[in-house]
Amino acid sequence: MDIVRLKSYISDVIGEENIKEKVNMAEYSSFKAGGCADLLVIPRNMDQLRYLLYLLGGAPNDSCGCAKEGSAKCGGDETKDGCGSCCSKADISYMVIGNSSNLLVRDGGYRGVLIKLGGEFTDIKVQGQYIISGAAALLSKVSKAALEASLSGLEFASGIPGSLGGGTFMNAGAYGGELKERLYSVRYISKDGMTEALKYADELEFGYRHSTFCDTGDIITEVTLKLQKGEREEISSLMRELAAKRNSKQPVNLPSAGSTFKRPENNYAGALIENAGLKGLSVGGAQVSDLHAGFIVNKQDATAKDIISLMKLVQNIVYDKSGIMLEPEIRIIGEE
């Protein structure tokens, strides 16, 4: 199955308005840089997502006669007698993205399908001390819902620009807090669309910028957070305090993907970069922020190549000076 045929299959189910071809991902990325994706699909409910994932990762090739007929000899299982390569799964790369606040598509673009959840996946509900939210809801909006319900514990996340699903995927954190501390449970669907399940926080193998979903490829669809009752004004005051700190110390006025590198053990990426004398270092339109060395920013029409080249240069210089190889926190996909 190719992209054209896939689009024809999903148009009636997902709606043509939710399927975009040759999409400039710079328009979606917080970096405001990067190449095009062959197809961006925005499923708005579980039925649409399940169908799309099944076609991409679980369905037999539609050119196979035995699969079309639903014959017991095959059904997409290549281990059965008489079933050849005609029954292989759709050969289309695909990936689910969040708010693209931690993602960079190389300038050559992404050959395949990027899936961005919408519709009911942005719904947020409050039930007592619990917030039940779709994975596509922005962390800023989930934090606002917590504030309105006088629920404390999510203040640290109020300025994180990503989605709740993306934040859960990488165990996002800021100012001493991490999502793993507030997670109660996660609903997800397998990457082939065949299985839906729920896991509790202690099953998610959380680590620094890591969860079990980084390894399995399964897709988070809903997250339940458990918070504490608090005083609304105290919650609001802490959010304002953290916002002021962020605005004074981070380059929020320029496109970036937040912290460019993960925090090394017993150290800080920003400090290592600054101590190496790299503040203000530029490649093309990309620059190590003058305000916070832990951020690479798009100062003037940077390409993805500019950003990646600067990242590599920073890594090499920091390694030469400190012996520490910085690990990117940004997910980089696509072709050169």
Image: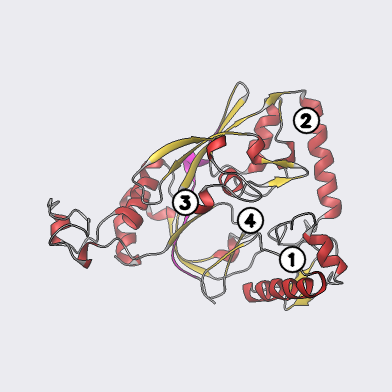
Q: Earlier in the sequence, mark 3 or mark 4?
A: 4
- Say which of 263 and 308 sits in front: 263
Residue 146 versus residue 10 in the image, above or below: above
- Label 2 and label 3: CA atoms lie apart by 35 Å
- Label 1 and label 2: CA atoms lie apart by 31 Å
Mark 4 belongs to which amino acid? Ser
Which quarter of the picture shows residue 271? bottom right
Q: Which residue is mark 4?
A: 101
Q: Earlier in the sequence, mark 4 or mark 1?
A: 4
Q: Is 119 covered by the magenta stretch?
A: yes
Q: Tell whether label 2 touches label 1 (CB within 8 Å).
A: no
Label 2, secondary structure: give it.
helix
Q: Which residue is mark 1?
A: 297
Q: Tell whether label 3 touches label 2 (CB within 8 Å).
A: no
Q: Which residue is mark 3?
A: 216
- The residue carrying pointer 1 sits among few (fewer than 14), some (14 to 19) or many (20 or more) residues within 10 Å by Cα, namely many
- The residue carrying pointer 3 sits among few (fewer than 14), some (14 to 19) or many (20 or more) residues within 10 Å by Cα, namely few
Q: Is residue 89 left or right of residue 123?
A: left
Q: Which residue is mark 2?
A: 235
- Say which of 224 and 276 sits in front: 276
Q: Earlier in the sequence, mark 1 or mark 2?
A: 2
Q: Earlier in the sequence, mark 3 or mark 1?
A: 3
Q: Earlier in the sequence, mark 2 or mark 3?
A: 3
